[in-house]
Amino acid sequence: MTHPPRHLLPLGVLAATLLGLPAGAYGPYPEPPPPPPATAPATTPTAPATPTAADGTPIYANTPQELAPFSRFVKEPYRRFFVEKLDYYGPGRDLPEPEVDTVVIGLLTPLERSQEAYIGQAILAGATLAIDDANARGGYRGKPFALDVRNDTGMWGASANEIIRFAHDSGARVILGTVDGANTHIAIRVALKVEIPMITVGDLDPTLPETKIPWIFRVVPDDRQQAYTLAYYLYRQLDRQRVAVIRANNRYGRFGVREFLDSSVRLGRPAPLEVNYEIDWARTNPDFTLQIERMRLIDPDAIVLWADAAPAGTLVRKLREAGIAAPVFACDRVIHPEFFAAAGVHAEGVVAVAPYDPEAGGERFADFHRRYSARFGQPPCGYAAHAYDGTMLAVQAIQQAGLNWAKIRDALAGLQLAGVTGPISFQHDLANRRRVLLSTARGGEFVIGEPRAETRF
Amino acid sequence: MPRTLARSLLVLSLLGLPGEGRAAAPAGQPVIHPYWESYTRADGLPDDKVMAVAVDGPRVWIGTDHGAAVLEDGAFRVFHRQDGLAHDAVLSVAVDPVSGDVWFGTGGGLSRYSAGRWTTFTQLTSGLPNDVIFGVAVENQNVWVATTAGTGRYRVRDHGWDVYTPANSPQHEPWGYFVDYADGLVWAALWGGGVLEFDVAKQTWKSYLDPDGEMEIDLFRDDGIVHVITTGVSYREGLLWASTYFGLSRYDGHQWRSFAETDTGIASDFINFVKARGKVVYICADKGLSALDGASPVDRTVTYTPIHGPLEGHRGWEARIYERGQLVGRQPLAAGLAHNFVWAVDFQGDDLWVATSRGLSRGSLRPLPPRPARIAGPERPGPPPAPATRHAPSPGEAARPTPPGQGGR
């Protein structure tokens, strides 16, 4: 069995336009579909079920007792939520299938005019490859799958309007998306009213499954798991005392670090500083002057960074140039060429949370990695890989259940997939809680599994 | 008890008929509506998935997933996009009690139906914050909308708009999910932001949040709103009711109470909508309809639900009576609701009009007379008339072909 290197990104050139999309036009790529991969995705029972406490009670989001809210003060809260599997008690399973020539899967993702477009482009590439693979294997009963791709602008609740259009105009059977936590929250409550399945492959907002919507599935482990893993590594393994936080001033940054900040308090090491930066930093504060000054004053023994790849890389470079040597621990978004391009040599040694282990995907990941790299000119990032898996989940659910939304939902809830990112299945809250890893930037790439986190979530 | 009477009650019970057999159900508020009938597409509804209902005197306005309708004199008249409706997915309906104008919150804008004419408001042609309108309410000369980009107020007289977001009201995200008006107060249920109260006279806002601030737990019972994702709100006779997907909360101005499926007997914690009449609140949930008496010292609750559990309505329905969370009586129903997944409710005299995912249901205190099924409007012939359904549709009955133009669920 051959594997690509166990790292997520060789130092590659930035290629914002390498996907070759014409401006304003989003759709399947014009290339002919590649041959079917040597190893087709398969279901597997290896994914973990919802963990339970000693008394058999399900534990939400793998949360240890010492990190549970108010656990130092109250033995048991009046009620704990998300401990029962979400189910849908409405009708619809008996409705006949719609007549279609093409099975449409909607994709809502930021592709332009967004600081998250680099993620959206990767998601589009991963989903496109999956659709082509599914069609190469015969589609759905001979009918091809197709992506209906829409740009997630995030303006005035636009994602709500897009869900309506997916459901009522394009007849999508499943919707994939999106990246921004606010836009996804806006989208999912429309999906709830419409009652259409939605799979998120790029939004790690911990509150997403905390809405109790039985139509929303998340493939990628979330920021809660990342935060817990970092907290235990920093406080228990490294015995750090003063960990400061820098984050983006948006919902991604705010909710990304929230569980880390809460965990710091609950583990007895409250963060001495949380400082944010504006999303238009490149125009208003390209040197991160305020953030650097605050870090100097605080003199932390570690810095946790929740930011997009480019500002994170710039921040690391500015911190080092200012003589601040505290080690940096970051979210998964830094595992991207834009981070290395911005940080330069200062990227070396930065630790990031990796949402998946390429080795867990085995031959499937190797095959995906090879074909993705050949087609798009750069290796896949984690978002591309999870987009591939999320799309394949949708495809498999449709192949299993047909085109009926409620039946697709039911199929998704029970699916277990051996994906390119590893085993995927859904806990009670319909989230895939596969445990995350740590990785370290070495020589222009992130090496997965280094350092070894003794406690992972 | 004389043997003959006992036998009669036993027979009635076995037949599942309401009547004197109600001896099993303790009397009191909320009263049990023992008689039910349902309307579906076969009766002229534009779609079986009914998401909104609003009573306007003798008329019943309905919003469905594929069109709006009004039921008057036993006949439906339906409206679609080509008639002037902003979008066929109608999520909310409100009637102006003074002008009689009907406002539809749709998936593609706000529509006003006034004296037979349609006016549409979208976010591109007006100050409407977003085109997907989860809730609409009429407050004096203003119309309020709950949208994902803010809670909006349309000033009908001067055609102006106000939009309330975190920039000008106490909310951290502008995610409106429902809006209601009563007694000089506008109430907004927010997705992730609890409940907002707007005092019309003072033009001031007030916020109600979950005190524990955590999404995954409710720390203490009765400490405030059970969860910050609120789905509906209703304020009547000094009682504020707020629904969530995690249970129900009530505030009387001094104390909060929370009500859950496990401790009260409401149909489910997953509540789509709530509406009070007097002290009694009606709770629209995914497993049935409940009525709870806010003045009852024992939290008396009546829950209408399929006997054999959700999705089993075709096997029979019953009304369950709870006090202090304990099941104290059950009454079989000769006919139940169209489905256990309930979206909305409104009141017409003693009757209940209930929007479900499989049709519009009417609950009555008295036996319902046979009704002719008619469809008004030659421009919308729809499916051929069929006898009114007086029972929950069986799976076989429900599996009718999806009409052209409907995306298919």
Image: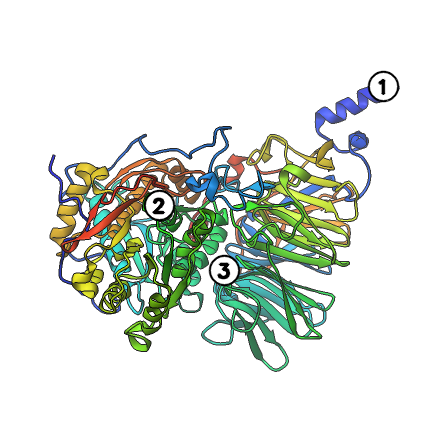
Q: Which residue is mark 2?
A: A229
Residue drawn at the location 51% of the way across and 65% of the way down: B174
Q: Which residue is mark 1?
A: B4
Q: Position of residue A443 (x, y in %)?
A: 13, 54
Residue drawn at the location 26% of the way across and 52% of the way down: A351
Mark 2 vs mark 1, foreground winner is 2
Q: Position of residue B398 (x, y in %)?
A: 52, 40
Left or right, residue A100 beside residue B206: left
- Chain bearing mark 3: B
User: Which scheme is used to colour this image of the protein?
Assistant: rainbow
Q: Position of residue B186 (x, y in %)?
A: 66, 66
- Give above or below for B331 relative to A445: above
Q: Earlier in the sequence, mark 1 or mark 3?
A: 1
Amino acid type, callout 1: Thr
Q: Marks 1 and 3, Cα distance to the nearest angstrom?
A: 56 Å
Amino acid type, callout 3: Asp
Please say if the residues under marks 1 and 3 sit with CB atoms less than 8 Å apart: no
Q: Which residue is mark 3?
A: B88
Q: Check if mark 3 and mark 2 are on a common chain.
A: no
- Chain bearing mark 2: A
